Amino acid sequence: MKRLRYTRHVDSGSAAEAYTRSEIRRILGINENSLRSWERMGLAQVKASYTFADLISLKTLQSLRENRIPARKIRDALHQLRLRLANVTRPLDELKIVSDGRRIAVELPGERMEALTGQMLFDFDAKTLRSGAALEFRKDEPEPTAGEDSSESWFQYALEMERCGAATNEIIDVYRKVVDCNPEAAGAWVNMGTLHYRQHLLPMAERCYKEALQAYPEYALAYFNLGNVCEETGRLDEAVQHYHSALRFQPDYGDAHYNLALVQERRNRFAEAIKHWQAYIDFDSSSPWSEIARRKRERLLRVAARKDHPVGGSLRKPIRGASE
């Protein structure tokens, strides 16, 4: 197999360039669930802190995911690039990668190569890829017209704006039109809340999630997101209540168990934390996050075994697959 020599690596050895998970999320405009899903799919490594090179990788990954490139296709493309390009071990931060939503290509000095096949691209193909990578929402697209389905039409319009990378405030304005047409549009309230959350406008996000629950009181995702807001603002008791509600309406909600375990550790409710770590492992037995859950569970069990450390409550083994 032909191996090309090329690297555009960003050296980031300075300790001052370390970022926390929270800082990474804010820079990228994503929440913890999005970052965790990339890690589960094997597109990003599970880390507690990040370098500038990691940030470049995640920005590239974010661009590919926004272009709706499937996770498996991204993994295969990165594997092929490591095979074909000598000295390249981290393609996402060492190379300039672009996509049109269908293909993944890498820009090399004086030429462009399709990542999966290794084929060189003609100028026409390369221009198509560049334009796809920089896709913008067309403001001349016709807006939905008034009618019985105007709420749904505006909702689909907002989703298209998100897909094409329109400005966040413009997307929020469209979701507002959705709920103006139909205040019971719980999905629009949740999406609007998440956009506010990404801007770290937590009170506005919380209001949107509560509006979603007014419209649809059994909306597990709205409870889960509301729990995230409460956790981030230090209201741990409320966060626990909302995560429990998410599990009540969606018993297989693994992420709710994960977050509950973390919150219960912070509250020194170790028996509860152990129970939710085990429940998470039952739902997710093979990802890097399950390894973290196992380590945390084992550590808490060792703490609980120490007679000089009060943990409170009995430490019964959770029933496999049980939920709150």
Image (cartoon, grey):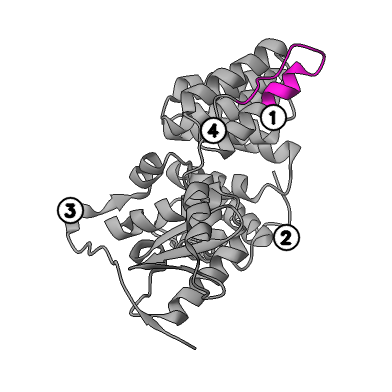
Q: Residues within 10 Å of mark 3 (few under 14, many from 20)?
A: few
Q: Please give left or right for residue 279 compared with residue 262 in the image.
A: right
User: Upstream in the sequence, badge 3 or badge 2?
Assistant: 3
Q: Where residue 173 sits: x, y (%)?
A: 55, 18
Give the extent of the magenta segment. Answer: 141-155
Tell which tag, 4 or 3, sits nearer the viewer: 4
Foreground: 224 or 299? 224
Residue marked by disc 3: 16
Q: Is residue 235 magenta?
A: no
| Labels 2 and 1 touching (C-beta < 8 A) | no
Instruction: Identify the element where label 4 is drawn.
Output: loop
Element class at badge 3: helix
**Which amino acid type is marked by label 4?**
Phe
Q: Nearer the viewer, mark 4 or mark 2?
A: 4
In this rendering, position of residue 36 left or right of residue 70: left
Q: Residue at x 61, y 53 (%)?
A: 275
> Relative to residue 304, is residue 9 drawn left or right?
left
- Three-letter residue code for mark 1: Gln
Tell me residue 141's x, y (percent): 62, 26
Which tag is nearer the camera, tag 3 or tag 2?
3
Q: Does the CB distance between marks 4 and 2 fall below 8 Å? A: no
Few, some or many C-alpha atoms within 10 Å of disc 4 (few <14, some 14-19, many ≥20)? Answer: some
Amino acid type, mark 2: Arg
Q: At numbered mark 1, what does the secondary structure look like: helix, strand or loop?
A: helix
Label 4 and label 3: CA atoms lie apart by 37 Å
Asked if the residue at tag 4 contacts the one at tag 1, i.e. Cβ–Cβ closer than 8 Å, the answer is no
**Percent of width and height locating residue 305:** 48, 63
Q: Which residue is mark 1?
A: 156
- Distance in Å between CA atoms under marks 2 and 1: 40 Å
